[in-house]
Amino acid sequence: MLEDQLQPRAGLEEKYEGKTYFLCCSMCEEKFRSNPERYSKARDPVSGASVDKATAPVVGYKDRAYFFESDNSRATFAQDPERYVQRLKE
């Protein structure tokens, strides 16, 4: 069940504007440091809203992290993740 794949906040820690961001590897760390404004944000696959990765609910699905503006948005994604993954590819 997708609900079981909620990711804990773990990884390489990077501070930006008083918040802590967790990155998976040194390559992500380099990208983040080169452009933190870009890499500190994500697009909610359900609502399309821009979210802050430091505070957004997150789910791991098919080896990728997805960030959400709310727990409700995350729960909607969990019901049919492929629908929303495809939307991001468009």
Image (cartoon, helix red, strand yellow):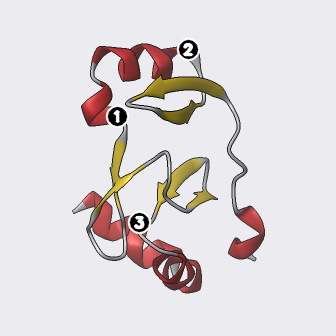
* Residue at x-position 30% and y-position 76%: 47
Disc 3, SS? helix
* Residue at x-position 30% and y-position 62%: 88
Q: Disc 1 to disc 3, how far (Cα)?
A: 19 Å
Q: Which residue lies under the disc numbered 1?
A: 39
Q: Disc 2 to disc 1, how far (Cα)?
A: 14 Å
Amino acid type for the residue under numbered disc 3: Val
Is residue 18 positioned above or below 75 on the image? above
Amino acid type for the residue under numbered disc 2: Ser
Amino acid type for the residue under numbered disc 1: Tyr
**Residue 66: x, y in percent?**
49, 57
- Of the numbered discs 3 and 2, the one sitting upstream in the chain is 2
Quick one: label 2, few (<14), some, or many (20+) residues within 10 Å?
A: few
- Of the numbered discs 2 and 1, the one sitting upstream in the chain is 2
Q: Disc 3 to disc 2, how far (Cα)?
A: 25 Å
Camera-nearest label, 1 or 3? 1
Q: Which mark is residue 85?
A: 3
Check the picture and name the quadrant holding the N terminus: bottom right
Contact check, label 3 and label 2, Cβ < 8 Å: no
* Residue at x-position 45% and y-position 32%: 18
- Of the numbered discs 1 and 3, the one sitting upstream in the chain is 1
